[in-house]
Image (cartoon, rainbow, N blue to C red):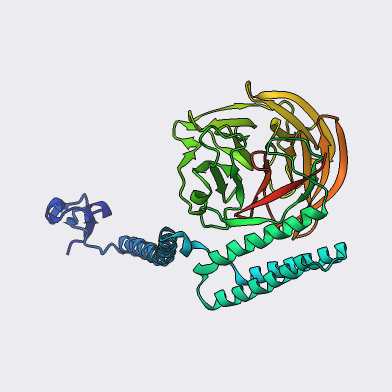
Amino acid sequence: MHPFLLLVLFASPTYAWLPLEDWGSGNVTGSVGESGQCICHVFLPDTTFPADCVESVQISANKLSVDVELHISKLISFKAQLVVLLEELSNLTVRLEVVESGPDKYVKLEFELLRIELREFEAMVTELKTSLNSSSPTFDSLYNEIRNMSMIVDQLESYDQSNLEVIRIEFAKLQKKLEKCRDEQDDFSNAQIGSCKHGGILRVGKPVVSQLNANLNAGYTYGGWGKDTNPLPGSENMYWYSASTDTLVRYVSVYTDYYSLIMRQAKKTYDLYAPNRDWRGVGNNHIIRNNTLYYQFSNPFSMAKYNMTSQTAEYRVVPKASNTFSYHYSANQNLDFAADETGLWVTYATEESKGKLVLGKIDEAVFALSEVWETSIFKQSVTNAFMICGVLYATRSVDIYTEEIFYTYDTHTRQESYVSIAFEKFLDFYVNLDYNPTNQKLYMYNQGYYVSYPVKFKSA
């Protein structure tokens, strides 16, 4: 038998993935070698099982399975968040319906807070009686009224809170009587609105807490509220509000009167941002004067004004003003605007003054500083400041319940002095405190609450 060589040629792996019709048919060819041996050439299609490709498919499938499980987990998480958001929306809707149903349903005060304030009044009456060394029928009458109001509080608590409007009215009457007793003891001025014929602040009254902000959210801790310090004719009763969860200044709402403010019925809300312009600011010490918002511009760092009538804005860089010195309570309070009987002011600090508070008078006609005074107090040690009749009043914290006016600077005489005029805080932290010359009141934005204070002046 002649020896023969059998050569088997397999199709390459590339062919294995071609359609069967493209493989061609298997065949056998033969030939005789040089030595006379028989050589057979055999071609067979490659039918080897592609295990490496199957492994690759399995790896891809496992990866896809993990991705699917991850997305399912995210969907479950989103569903849980959606449930929470829907509950919050439902709660907000209910609260809105209560507000819209009438002011009598809106009034909500804490009974225990009322009891505490009544006890404070009783202590004040006792202090006045002791200081005057008197036992007149007036004091007996006040004691009786306090006891009667305590009984009314107890009765109201057993009914519903919507009747608290009654106790609020009685409470205001009693507060006026006590203020009258104190006025009779003190040598205070009856300076008319807009007049500077007095000797400066004698005392600051007790805080009047109007309500939580228009957003119904105590998280809106940064911002301000109040009245126009020089209103246009027909806008004498207008109030404004602007707040945020951070120090950004973007939205400003105006209200026709105090009732509209309390009922959260804004006449108009202005937005300082639009796709074609960005007039947003930062900080908390902005005011409204002549229907114009004065505030700290964001970029560039400068003072700005937004005219709500024309809805246009402009800014001016304050010479040498630094954006590194803020008030004690909050960041970004680098420019603090104030208004009084004499005009418009701004306080700030400079690198040149080494952080000491600088006071500038603004010429409203050209929107630029007309005169500057440098004080001796470091701005970062001050919690806030305001102006009355050309005199700067600076505050600092005494404790969580008490704030103190501790420093004054008279721009007329360039004389400074250290004083101690304590007043009560509703809550510890606040960011906006400004005087309004149209009603001689201080307006404070106190951790999301509208708070105001009556101011008594010394005799000239």
Residue 91 versus residue 158: which sits nearer the camera? 158
Quarter holding residue 289? top right
Q: Residue at x 64, y 68 (%)?
A: 114
Q: Is residue 378 left or right of residue 304?
A: right
Which x, y percent locates residue 99?
Answer: 45, 59
Q: Is residue 243 above or below residue 42?
A: above
Q: Residue at x 54, y 78 (%)?
A: 158
Which x, y percent locates residue 336?
Answer: 69, 38
Extreme residue in the bottom direction? 158
Where, quadrant-wise, is the N terminus in this rendering? bottom left
Q: Is residue 452 above or below residue 47?
A: above
Residue 35 versus residue 451: which sits nearer the camera? 451
Which x, y percent locates residue 47?
Answer: 21, 62
Q: Residue at x 51, y 76 (%)?
A: 159
Residue 433 appears in the figure: no
Residue 286 versus residue 341: which sits nearer the camera? 341
Q: Is residue 313 above or below residue 48?
A: above
Which x, y percent locates residue 215?
Answer: 51, 53
Extreme residue in the top direction? 366
Residue 216 appears in the figure: yes
Q: Is residue 388 left or right of residue 304?
A: right
Residue 110 versus residue 163: which sits nearer the camera? 163
Quarter holding residue 400? bottom right
Where, quadrant-wise, is the C terminus in this rendering? top right
Q: Is residue 11 left or right of residue 361?
A: left
